[in-house]
Image (cartoon, grey):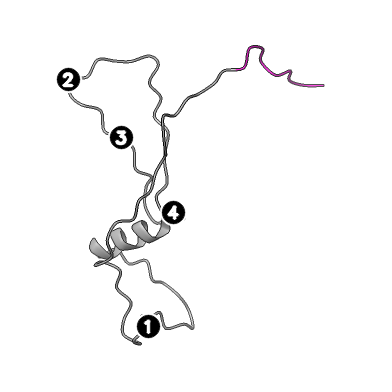
Amino acid sequence: MPLSRPLLPTPRAKSKPNPGLRNRPTRNLAANRIADLDRRHVPWKQFREINFVNIDYKPFDASGWPAMASGLLGPVRLLVPATPPATGP
């Protein structure tokens, strides 16, 4: 079961439909995801037979972590092969 839904870009109300635009689900760094869950008080620390604590043996809380750089670097291109791959035997 995923901890949260993938982040998707939100279309602008005045934007024109673009047939070449493709939305793809993306994932974030685990550290950013954990910090966001703690900021929103989402119960994600559901472990059995373990005490999840910080380095000072106090309850773990990542809500104060700064956001780390994450995401795609550079322009993203989708390339279509010149000939589709053969299917079936």
Q: Amino acid at mark 1?
A: Ile
**How far apart are the alpha carbons under marks 4 and 3?**
19 Å
Do the numbered discs 4 and 2 sit on residues whose CB atoms are within 8 Å? no
Q: x, y (%) of residue 22?
A: 41, 24
Q: Amino acid at mark 3?
A: Pro
Foreground tag (1 vs 2): 1
Q: Decide which of tag 4 and tag 2 comes sooner along the chain.
A: 4
Residue 78 falls within the magenta-colored stretch: no
Foreground tag (1 vs 4): 1
**Residue, disc 2:** 14
- 83 with respect to 76 (left or right): right
Foreground tag (4 vs 3): 3
**How far apart are the alpha carbons under marks 3 and 2?**
15 Å
Q: Residues within 10 Å of mark 2 (few under 14, many from 20)?
A: few
Judged from the image, the secondary structure of the residue bearing numbered disc 1 is loop
**Residue, disc 3:** 9
**How far apart are the alpha carbons under marks 1 and 4?**
27 Å
Foreground tag (1 vs 3): 1
Q: Which numbered disc covers residue 55?
A: 1
Vertical placement of residue 11 versus 57, above or below: above
What span is in magenta?
81-89
Q: x, y (%) of residue 52?
A: 40, 79
Q: Residues within 10 Å of mark 3 (few under 14, many from 20)?
A: few
Q: Decide which of tag 1 and tag 2 comes sooner along the chain.
A: 2
* Magenta part, dominant SS: loop
Outermost residue to the front: 74
